[in-house]
C-alpha cells in the first residue's frame, strides 16, 4: 500500500497592521491666536462686503426714485462728489447737525450760563479740515465771516467761541504767527460727547437722539469701550 503523506496545514497569513492615522495635534499658544485672528478678519471682511452691498443697494434705490420723481433731470445741475470735475469737498460725521445743536446747548456749562453758539465755529473747522484732523487758520477775519460773525468784534467773537470748543474738549489750539489760535486740532466728537455725557453735562433727550442716529448709520464711536 502506498502511504499518503499528511499535508501540513497552511499557516494563516499574519494580518498586516495598518499604520495608525496620526491624530491632529491642537497647538497652543500663538497658533490658535493667529487662527482666531484670521477668523475675525474674515468676519470683518464679510461684514464690510455686506455693508458695501447695502450701500450699493441704497444708492441704486435712490437713483431709481430720483429718476421717477425728476425724469427730465440734468445731472450737471447737481453737485455730486462722484463727479471728478467737482473739487472742494470734505468728510464729516453725518450727525454734524445734531452735534452743532448739542454744542450750542452745552456751551452754557463752561460760560456761566451765557449762550454761546459755538456750533457754527465748529462747522467752519470741519469745512476746512482734511483727513489729518488738523486745521490751520491763517486769516481769522475770513474764518469769522464764514461762521457768521461780522462787525468790529468778529475776530474777538471767533476766538471766544474757539475757547469754548477747547474748554468742552472738542478741539485744542496752538499759537502761530497769524494769531493765538492759528493751529487747531479736532478730536473725535463722539468721544468728546461721551465724556461730557458721563459728567452729566448733556440733556438725556439730546444724547438719546444722537445715539439713535449713530446706530442707524452703523457708527460705533458711542459704543466703543
Image: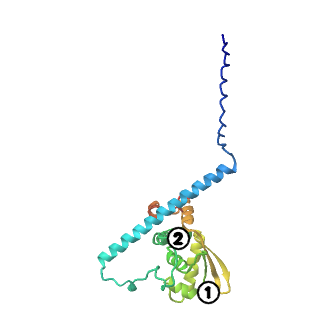
SS at badge 2: helix
Give 112 or 102, whichever is nearer the viewer.
Answer: 102
Q: Which quadrant is the C terminus positioned in?
A: bottom right
Residue 43, how many percent across, how many down?
Answer: 54, 56
How many marks the image carries: the answer is: 2
At x 52% / y 75%, what residue is drawn?
Answer: 91
Which residue, as the protein is rendered here, is positioned at the far right?
29
Residue 1, how many percent across, how many down?
Answer: 66, 10
Give 102 or 109, whichever is nearer the viewer.
Answer: 102
Could you tell whether 53 is left or right of 121 in the image? left
SS at badge 1: loop
Residue 51, how many percent across, how many down?
Answer: 47, 63
Residue 107, how many percent across, how many down?
Answer: 52, 70
User: How far apart, in angstroms, are the residues tagged by discs 2 and 1?
Assistant: 25 Å
The answer to whether the residues at label 2 and label 1 have Cβ atoms under 8 Å apart is no
Give 216 or 9, whichever is nearer the viewer.
Answer: 9
Could you tell whether 184 is left or right of 52 in the image? right
- Which circle marks residue 138 in the picture? 1
- Which circle marks residue 107 in the picture? 2
Could you tell whether 214 is left or right of 36 in the image? left
Which residue, as the protein is rendered here, is positioned at the far front?
1
At x 51% / y 89%, what residue is drawn?
Answer: 151
Q: Is residue 71 visible?
A: yes
At x 37% / y 74%, what residue is drawn?
Answer: 63
Which residue, as the protein is rendered here, is positioned at the far bottom?
152
At x 44% / y 67%, what residue is drawn?
Answer: 55
Amino acid at each position: 500500500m502506498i502511504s499518503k503523506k499528511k499535508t501540513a496545514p497552511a499557516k494563516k497569513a499574519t494580518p498586516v497592521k495598518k499604520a495608525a492615522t496620526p491624530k491632529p495635534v491642537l497647538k497652543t499658544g500663538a497658533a490658535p491666536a493667529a487662527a482666531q485672528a484670521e477668523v475675525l478678519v474674515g468676519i470683518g471682511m464679510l461684514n464690510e462686503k455686506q455693508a458695501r452691498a447695502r450701500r450699493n443697494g441704497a444708492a441704486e434705490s435712490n437713483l431709481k426714485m430720483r429718476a421717477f420723481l425728476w425724469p427730465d433731470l440734468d445731472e450737471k445741475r447737481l453737485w455730486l462728489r462722484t463727479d471728478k470735475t467737482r473739487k472742494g469737498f470734505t468728510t464729516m460725521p453725518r450727525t454734524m447737525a445734531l452735534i452743532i445743536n448739542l454744542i450750542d446747548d452745552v456751551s452754557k456749562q463752561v460760560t456761566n450760563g451765557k449762550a454761546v453758539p459755538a456750533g457754527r465755529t465748529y462747522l467752519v473747522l470741519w469745512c476746512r479740515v482734511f483727513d489729518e484732523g488738523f486745521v490751520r487758520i491763517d486769516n481769522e477775519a475770513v474764518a469769522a465771516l464764514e461762521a457768521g460773525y461780522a462787525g468790529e468784534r468778529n475776530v474777538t467773537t471767533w476766538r471766544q467761541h474757539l475757547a469754548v470748543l477747547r474748554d468742552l474738549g472738542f478741539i485744542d489750539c496752538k499759537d502761530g504767527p497769524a494769531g493765538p489760535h492759528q493751529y487747531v486740532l479736532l478730536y473725535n466728537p463722539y468721544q468728546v460727547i461721551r465724556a461730557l455725557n458721563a459728567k452729566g453735562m448733556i440733556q438725556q433727550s439730546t444724547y438719546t437722539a444722537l445715539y439713535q442716529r449713530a446706530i442707524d448709520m452703523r457708527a460705533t464711536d458711542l459704543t466703543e469701550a
